Image (cartoon, rainbow, N blue to C red):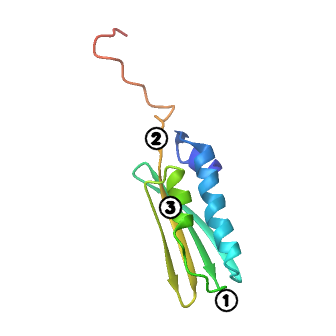
Amino acid sequence: MEALHAWGYERFDEEAVRAVVKLLVTAAVDDGGAHLSLHLTDHQDHALVLVLGSGPRTGRPDDGSLLHAVAAQGAADCGTESAQDGRRRWALLSLTSSVPADLPKALPQNATP
């Protein structure tokens, strides 16, 4: 959450973001990969959470339950992709950006300063 706050996002569902990260990381750990990496980026009021699991896997196919659970947390989009070197899981979460503190907030049209 610290990174999202540092990037200027103040009003977003922190519980949903935490839940999505936990779901993606847990799925990668359960997959039995040797290594795991978590990536977070923002673009146009959205956060992309990407979890990469590499190395040997259990070989279990995705049954769709992970994507349903992630979507239930409000993800705008999500997916998985398998390759020889591991599996990628991602979710795109909508964020509401705050107005930077050093910028004046607009007054309603009928208000006087």
Element marked by disc 2: strand
- Spatial CA distance of label 1 from label 2 is 38 Å
* Residue 31: x %, y % from top left: 66, 78
What amino acid type should be assigned to the residue bearing mark 2?
A: Thr
Density class for disc 1 (Cα within 10 Å; few <14, some 14-19, many ≥20) is: some
Residue at the (36%, 18%) spot, across then down: 107
Mark 1 / mark 3, whichever is N-terminal = 1
Q: Which residue is mark 1?
A: 56
Residue at the (56%, 79%) spot, across then down: 87
**Closer to the camera in the image, 65 or 76:** 65
What amino acid type should be assigned to the residue bearing mark 3?
A: Ala
**Closer to the camera in the image, 87 or 70:** 70
Element marked by disc 1: loop
Per the rendering, the mark at residue 96 is 2
Mark 2 / mark 3, whichever is N-terminal = 3
* Residue 41: x %, y % from top left: 51, 60
